[in-house]
Image: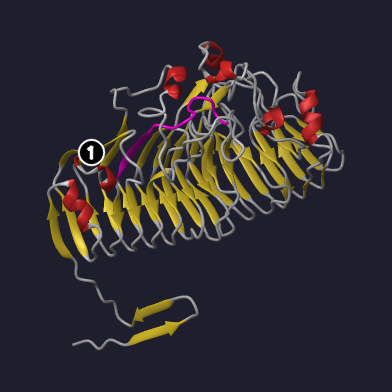
Amino acid sequence: MKATILFIIFTPMLLFVSFQDETEIKQVELPVSNLAELREAVTKSNQVITLKPGNYIITELPEDARSFVCSGSNNIINLSGVYIDFPVGTCKDAHFNFTGSNNKLSGGVFEETYQNGMKEVTDFGSYNQNRKTLAKGLKGGAGFRLSGNGNTIEGIKLTVRGSFPYGYGNMYGIGRGNATGLDKRCAMLITGVGNTVDNCEFQHRAFGHVIYMQKNADKTVIKNTYIEGAVRPSNDTYKETNDGDLPKRFNYKMPLGAMKGLPIPKDVMFNLTEDGIRAYNIPGSVTVENCTVVKCRGGIKLYMAKGEVKVINSTVLDCVVEGYSLNNGGEMINCKGNAAYGPLIYMHFDKVSNQKIDLTVLPSPHAVGNHVFAAIKGTGHQIHIKRANFKGEIDNTLRPIVVGYPARFEFLTTDYPGVPKGYEENFEKHFGDKDYTAINITIKNDTEYPVILGAKSHDNHIKSVGIITDLNKSNSIKQIEN
């Protein structure tokens, strides 16, 4: 018999137990045949739980028992061949809440459905006036929560529906100080350590983040996953003419922020969801690999993470506010994307530094709006922007790569360094006295997009196929051939 040596290490907060040789935990096979049995099983540990394949509806359970609190640990939860319907308006809390650790949920299709059978929202005015079974939201926001450590969600498909307001992008607010009240509906919240999302699909048809990280999230891995939101033309809001419709209630004007009082912008896209993959002020690391994010507010938005950030072999398409946004030292390796409805690269913090970006631009002949291609500031970045191998125009507009800029995305347009017509007063009020610098940044631009170096940009090194404009005259620039 092999001898086992037990080491116990005490710290003020944690107890770690490790073994010299690998010791496998024996798991008991546990078949379950209904949702009630599944709900009970996931509160215990060391099991292989298999739910009988078939179609289920959460209303089979009592109203106060419609959340699966996975408080057990070391479980494998096999839901292959299982479909669970979560009708909007019938659930008070998260669908699956992983408070235990080292669990693996594998397989399963989870769909939030409207009780009237509707699949897609077309009448946004009447939708937002039905706060009971349509624009309902969800307590705590997220359908899946991973607060325990070392959990894996693998091979699921989740469709999210039902939020208020829905259909207007960020116009009515995204947090405190909103104009209408908020009832968000998100897909997955990660707050624990060492959690993994692998080979999943998220169809997000609600206002809220798809996958987001908060609190103590660390060592998060999101890979082989597809995320799709929805967008709609801003012009459609002017067709909402009933008294209860939100655009009419606010006289078709922007009610908040730097654009307050301006007319709802025309000929742009509104995102109907929030961000595809989002990190808030977390202490830890995030790795995103082989993922695709389509039609969200922000695509892969990790600028607030404090740990190591790597985005590898991933693609962002048709996002509205930004495609990628990294933190200090963040790396983007062999990634792709387009700037169809908003900038593909956007840097939030003024002093962000030392990003490494390797990005291939995909065509966007369907692009609308007067946004820029990229907004770059800070210090010490190494950026290579490449053109994918395709024939024809990369875009219907040659959007600038702006280096150093004094504005948020609403005012950062193809008019740069000018301000969009009609926006001058708002710009002066919010950004007229601010100067954002860009220093010691190296960019190689192999696309026809032009590069504009702002007045506060200096000591940068730019090689570009697209035309270079240096408003500071103190940068190293070189025009290169395609």
The residue at which mark 1 appears reads as 59
- Across and down, in percent, residue 361 comes to 56, 34
Could you tell whether 398 is left or right of 210 in the image?
right
Quarter of the picture holding the N terminus? bottom left
Does 365 sit above or below residue 462? above
Query: Which residue shows up at 51% across the image and 53% down it?
Result: 214
Quarter of the picture holding the C terminus? top right
Could you tell whether 253 is left or right of 108 in the image?
right
- Across and down, in percent, residue 332 comes to 56, 48
Could you tell whether 1 is left or right of 382 in the image?
left
Q: Is residue 169 magenta?
A: yes
Q: Nearer the viewer, residue 437 or 275?
A: 275
Query: Which residue shows up at 45% across the image and 49% down it?
Result: 289
Segment tinted magenta in the rendering = 156-170
Does 126 sit above or below residue 203? above
- Across and down, in percent, residue 481 comes to 69, 32
Could you tell whether 347 is left or right of 314 in the image?
right
Q: Is residue 7 magenta?
A: no
Q: Nearer the viewer, residue 363 or 204?
A: 204
Residue 412 seen in the current view:
no
Residue 376 seen in the current view:
yes
Determine the main secondary structure of the stretch shown in magenta.
loop
Q: Secondary structure at mark 1?
A: helix
